[in-house]
Image (spheres, coloured by chain):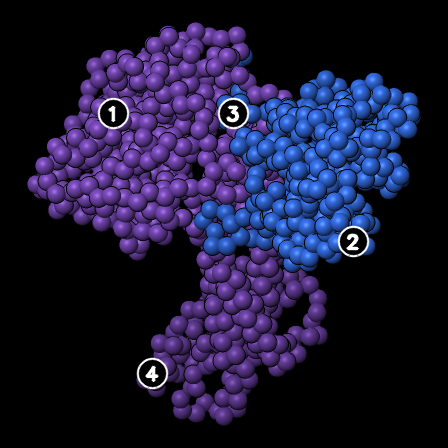
Amino acid sequence: MTNMIRLHTFHGGIHPAENKHQSTIRPLGRAPLPAQLILPLDQHIGAPARPLVAAGDHVLKGQMIADADGFVSAPLHAPTSGTVTAIETRPVPHASGLEEPCIVIEPDGRDEWLEHQGLAAQLGVDDLRDIEPRQLTAHIRNCGITGMGGAGFPTAVKLSTGQQQIDTLILNGAECEPYITADDMLMRERAGDVVRGAQILLHIVGARRCLIGVEDNKPEAIAALNQALVNLNEQHHIDVVTIPTKYPSGGEKQLIRILTGEEVPSGGIPASLGIVCQNVGTAAAVCRAVDHGEPLISRITTLTGDALQQPQNLEVLIGTPVSHLLQLAGYQPQKKERVIMGGPMMGFALPQLELPVIKTSNCLLAPTDQELPPNDIAMACIRCGMCAEACPAELLPQQLYWFSKSQEFDKAEQHNIFDCIECGACSYVCPSHIPLVQYYRFAKGAIREERAAQAKAERARLRFEERQARKEREEAEKEARRKARAEAAEKAQQEKKAAAAADAATPAAGSPPDSEALEKLQKKLDAAQTAKTRTQEKLAAARADDSLTDKVPALEAALVKTQDKIKELAQEIAAAKKAAKAAPSAEAAAGASDKGDPNSPERLKRKWETALARLETAQKRLEQAKADGSDTVTALQDGIAKQQLRVDEARSAYDAAINGTAPASTTVSAEEIEALQKKILAQQDRVRKMQERYDMARAEGLDTVDALAGGVKKQQDKLQQLQQELAAAQNPLATTDNEAS
Amino acid sequence: MGLLTLSSPHTHGPNSTSKVMANVVLATLPGLAVMTWFFGWGSLINVLFASLVALASEAAVLLIRKRPVSFFLKDNSALVTGVLLGLALPPFAPFWVTLVATAFAVVFSKQMYGGIGNNPFNPAMVGYALVLVSFPVQMTTAWALSTQMSGSSILGFGDTLQVIFAGHSTLADAYSGATPLDAYKHLIGKNTADTVLAEATFNGWLNGGWEWVNMAFLAGGLYLLARRIITWQIPLAMLLSLSLCSLIFGWDEDMYTPLSLHLLSGATMLGAFFIATDPVSASTTPTGKLIYGAGTGILLYVIRTWGSYPDAVAFSVLLMNFAAPFIDAYTQPRSYGHQKARRGLPEKN
Ligand code: SF4
Ligand code: SF4
């Protein structure tokens, strides 16, 4: 079934030399087992996976060795059978060149599979369509599948489109970057898997149709896909759409525009247009996972560049070291050695070669100097506007450049810097050879850092306000209780005067109405405040994560609403408190003469005595009530229990005060401990702050990463030291503490 | 590890600033050739001399500013400034006029602002405006008559050198005169179009050589367009607005300079394709370029018609240079995924 799809075009774009033929001469190969597999826990967007194995464990091929930690996360599986030799930090392929926790596996050479079978067989159903989409998504998640074309977003998350009605599933087979042919090879040799994956995905998202977009420079792939569709031998809604070759047509937003003419709203996701976009490699992985129960443990990686004698595509186990692969392809180290993971437009140059291939590594490019001359020295911008002509996001790259350079970040934001997809088209055409993208990364990083700092300051302010509110609230409660007691006392007196007549009036059970209202208000305020903190956390997360930016406005609105509510409540509380204060309580008046240290032993003693006296009265009253068979008995019993507690409390306070002359060293230590604890809190804050900055810098690939990493380490060391001090200070005290309690 | 780690992209297109500038110079050559054909050696000598001065002043300032001289000279931007001035100045202008204009353009209106890319005004036009207001006599009388008009051959190369560098301006007397724009503007007050056109300057036809000069610059401009070195917005908007003004206000040939003379005489095409399009000082957004070009065309017409200068490319371009940043701020394009463009300046909060 082939419909004519009307193609659209996107603004700008470039036609760099394709250089794809080198790596498609040889058929798809398979890389032999390396001596070691290094599996970073963080290969995807979201939280790093949580290890399920320990060093020394034997694992089977396909066994889950680390589980997803949170919704936006992905598990990890052993690519072959062998022994886990270590779980430690290793250098990972990331622009920052930093080390991250990895599971290291030494293959045993047997390549022994964990028992596995397709989902349909597992569930005992014949047809995939009998399986709930939710179940399929969960299975895909369990198989560790993440986007294989781009940044590695967990596929299951992308498929959880919630309420959105999905109309079109787009499979991205454009592969517009020069040199890379991994998807091309996949489509040529495993078109069946891609098509099957498309069918599964169609069922999951409930889309009406699937469009597979392939650039017209891949005729073999297009033919293979069409053949696979014919081989299906059944009705389907999948179309292979040939699109003109133009970089970056494989950008998700650009491809959507080409195929549907629609634009993903800035900061939004395709699902809002009823579109889900997946890479063809991801679709094939979904097919392997659902039909065969195979988790994502390998991928096709292009090895290319003139520094390789046998450029080709290889099926590579995740975790295979880059050096191993380069060796296989006949790598000839150059004078100015350079190996790029990804393509020449968007890839990043590896800082060293002992790095593993990860789920997103589609290409290893080892160019010679003549092939890709290192960047020339940048000249001044002559404002020629060629960058704007080339920009697929229809931005004004030169303005963004000026603003980034002069750190006028507000203007950069106003010029939509966050819509930049970092495709590099502007840099490519710039006659002055300005590394424009680098400037944008810098500016984006700085803006994100600023936002995070702002959010933090806001959080701190809130915490302070909360504390303040809590203090006031406590005070108000005290006041209310005092008043209640005074009233109760008065009543009791009156009752006494009225002689021990019949039934004892119920003592003011519960607090007087105004204090009750106050408490209710307070509870509301508390709830509002928790809601606010939660919203803020979500907001910060959404802001930090590009893929969630669409949620920001909604969250912001929610935040404003909650804040308003909090303000309102705070006002009400203040009013209520004022009212409470205005009614001077008897007790307050009585206690006015006794304005000494509230913790003086005498006062405490008096407190204890009053409490005791009250207890006695209550007990008397209870007996009376019991004798009368009054129905207030239970209430009185409750009251007595409470009163008993109060008595105990007052007594222990008094005892403590009496023993207050107790060993000075203890008090000092307690103070010290408190100080230490405060210090630790502050330090934890600092560590967090550092970590945030480091994460941000890392995400942006900023130059400051190394320095920040050092900073994090330093702060953590300090924290540890403080914690040790605290432990040391607390230990000798442990015994005294026990005694006291 | 000695691995080279550079930020993406790792590849670059074949374009470069020096190639862009060299192409601009290349595109002026037809115009220069036609000028030499009709008006003699003056323009060619001016172009060469101005280029030399421009390069020398640029080098001198770079030395003083302690910048790498050859690196910046290679960007060819000083060369472009020199060539444009050489083309714009009167062919028989004494050498010191060219010297002052060029040196001022390079030193004061370009390097003083930080060199290439940083000048808010078109350097060549700043130099031109300076000598136009400072030396009005030389700037109006040193124009060469076309061979079509004088009917004679051009002034010899040696004599031209003498006129320009030795001050023997009398040698050129028989070969010089007012430009057609100037002549028409002055004569039409007392005559009808027919009588004016009968004058030697026009030789019965409108422009007497100038039309060919303008056609040649138009051809050069089209070359730049084809090479995507300039975009169509500024030239088209400028020529359209100039034509529109001329049709609305100057439809009467007996009162005002006719459209054909506006378009094909003076520095119109040179201005539209080579001067107003100077990327550094012009507007840069697509819509902005249209506004900028239209503004230049309108100002050009206004000054030519009601101002005291016969030609006004320099002034209109400079005036629009002032407006360029403002225009840019309000003409940002709509970016992908946005309903409408964000315009104006960021709100301060
Ligand atoms: S392409 Fe380069 S020189 Fe031209 S405007 Fe853009 S940044 Fe400036
Ligand atoms: S890198 Fe950004 S600014 Fe440059 S062309 Fe791509 S989207 Fe536009």
Residue B13 circle label: 3
Please give the chain letter of the residue carrying mark 3. Answer: B
CA–CA distance in space, label 4 to label 1: 91 Å
B338 to the left or right of A296: right
Residue at 42% x, 44% y: name it.
A547
Please give left or right for residue B125 compared with residue A299 in the image. right
Q: Which chain is blue?
A: B
Tags 2 and 3 both on a single chain: yes
- Quadrant assignment for the N terminus of chain A: top left
- Per the model, the C-alpha gap separating discs 4 and 2 is 124 Å
The residue that disc 2 covers is B191
Do pointers 3 and 4 mark residues of a single chain? no
Q: CA gap, disc 1 to disc 2?
A: 76 Å
Disc nearest the viewer among 4 and 2: 2
Which residue appears at 40% of the width and 91% of the height?
A: A502
Determine the CA span between mark 3 and mark 4. 94 Å
Of B334 and B107, nearer the camera is: B107
Q: Earlier in the sequence, mark 4 or mark 1?
A: 1
Pointer 2: residues within 10 angstroms few (<14), some, or many (20+)? some
Which corner quadrant of the image does residue A726 belong to?
top right
Residue that badge 4 annotates: A631
Image x and y of residue B56, in percent: 80, 21
Specify the amino acid type for callout 2. Answer: Asn
Q: Badge 3, how many Cα within 10 Å: few under 14, some, many 20+?
A: some
Nearest to the eye among marks 3 and 4: give it. Answer: 3
Q: Earlier in the sequence, mark 2 or mark 3?
A: 3
Q: Which chain is purple?
A: A
User: Helix, strand, or loop for circle 1?
Assistant: helix
Mark 1, residue position: A220
Mark 4 — on which chain does it sit?
A: A
